Image (tube, helix red, strand yellow):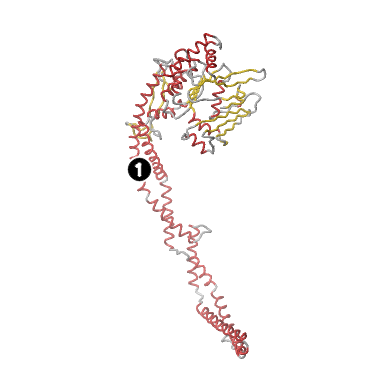
Amino acid sequence: MRIRDLGVIDDAVVELAPGFTAVTGETGAGKTMVVTSLGLLLGGRADPALVRNGSERAVVEGRLTLDPASPVVARALEAGAELDDGELLVSRTVSAEGRSRAHVGGRSVPVGLLAELGEDLIAVHGQTDQQRLLRPSRQRGALDRYAGEAVAEPLARYREVYRELREVSATLEELTTRARERAQEADLLRFGLEEVAAAEPVAGEDAELAVEAERLGHADALSSAATLAHAALAGDPADPEAVDAGTLLAQARRAVDAVRHHDERLAALADRLGECGYLLADVAGDLAGYADDLDADPVRLAAVEDRRAVLAHLVRKYAGTEGTLAEVLGWAETGSVRLLELDGDDERIDELGARETELRARLADLAAEVSQARHAAADKFAAAVSDELAELAMPHARVTFAISQLDDLAGIELEGRSVAYGPHGVDEVEVLLAPHPGAQPRPIAKGASGGELSRVMLAVEVVFAGADPVPTYLFDEVDAGVGGKAAVEIGRRLAKLARSAQVVVVTHLPQVAAFADRHLVVEKTNDGIVTRSGVKTLSDEERVRELSRMLAGLEDSELGRAHAEELLEAARTARGR
């Protein structure tokens, strides 16, 4: 992790190795900025006051080595990030004006994504931090993971039933709460379908009637035109003197026929005149037939117009002003299917009601099975945490789990009670702490001081190691308020936790720092103009000097150095056990 212009840190690189890393330094050197940097990198709140005086922005960059199967990798790739040789690059920038930017795998992302990734990356425990395990939902999840298959298997079956029950209940509620609306819809559909059925419309009928209405409405004009055209082609019996087209065409043909044998071209024209004669005779005959067949029938016209009015009414009502008869027929077909659905609702309501009752009973059985497994795991978990606390200068502290259910009239029946239920079962899980004999057990967030709370969290994490998928733990001043043997035991337990996870501890106790696999010191210098801090990885010799300083306040004290070497040797021996 690289930190630039954050608080008293000008530019520093922090290398956090696997296992246990201790971070020490004199008061005010900037140890807290290391914790703050991790917080920023994983979505913490951006405070412009953190930006180093005189700088425009603070920048924290991190390189994360992750399991390819980690949900963090999947979520980052989903957001468009790219991996760099299997590692994920993350950065956070905070400007002096308060603006904040985040990047994951080379892609600009919302800061909320960093917080989302941080949930699965690191668990932070400090004097003022809101611990993940302080939230009841997290405590329930922790207990379930500690219980393993004893809870996981029935809980998986519970969730399947829960999902189906939600679907059935939602459908049933929709059917019952909208019964009146659906009845009205059914009545309207039924009326409309009956109206359409009574009219018995036929596809294309509207177009055919329009053509017929047009012809009947102009029968007189059509008849007169056909008669005049026939007279022009074939002659008018009432006027024998009138010259018609047929007579003139016959004269033209006779004139040409007389000399056609003298020229082939003229012979061809004579043939075409003959064809024209035949065509003219056909057209004249058709005109005569058309005029004879055409009859002005006011009764039929009225019937056609009435039928068109009926169809137009259906179109306006069921297809809209710009609709067609085809759309009316389509509406009727769709409406028939919908009416069958609505008419079958009562039967569906009965079936769904019976299924809902069956699922609720099944869900109650599975909830009881999950709850029983949780109680069994809670007793073991609480006893193990209490044993750990006894070694952390809290010999009389007792941790218990309060597993309860909330009454809910709309819930499921469990042991004669109607209790609330959700996707995780019916249990409300909370960790309680009685810090000393006679104390009433209270939620750990309220029943412990800052130092006690950190030790409780450490004890929980040690017991829980291996079950929680979070790969990194950060403890800030977890050893506050303790010393001597208790400090040694804190160091021992942090080393134990580091066997299965990465552990970073900011500490002022040499007994704790001695157990670390890597020791970082935050050093502050003053050039008279600006304060700078650097983060240094200590060699074995430098580590002895730092522990001597922490023990005696003197880096080169022979007694302090001897004590530091003794402390390191004792820690190595304890870790080897």
Is 145 situated above or below 201? above
Q: Residue 373's image quarter?
A: top left
Q: Residue furthest top?
A: 559
Other-residue count near label 1 (Cα within 10 Å), few / some / many at <14 / 14–19 / ≥20: some
Q: Which residue is mark 1?
A: 353
Q: Residue at x 57, y 36 (%)?
A: 106
Mark count: 1
As displayed, is residue 311 above or below residue 360? Answer: below
Q: State the image coordinates of residue 151 (x, y, percent, origin top left).
A: 36, 31
Q: Residue furthest bottom?
A: 258
Return the x and y of residue 180 as percentages of the image width and height. Answer: 41, 47
Name above or below for residue 232 compared with residue 474.
below
Of residues 364 and 412, the one nearer the viewer is 364
Q: Indicate the position of residue 238 as horizontal and vertical percent values.
A: 57, 86
User: Type of residue at label 1?
Assistant: Gly
The C terminus lies in quadrant = top left
Residue 386: percent from the left, percent from the top?
39, 19
| Secondary structure of residue under mark 1 | helix
Q: Is residue 166 above or below residue 457?
A: below
Q: Quadrant of the N terminus?
A: top right
Q: Nearer the viewer, residue 397 or 33?
A: 33
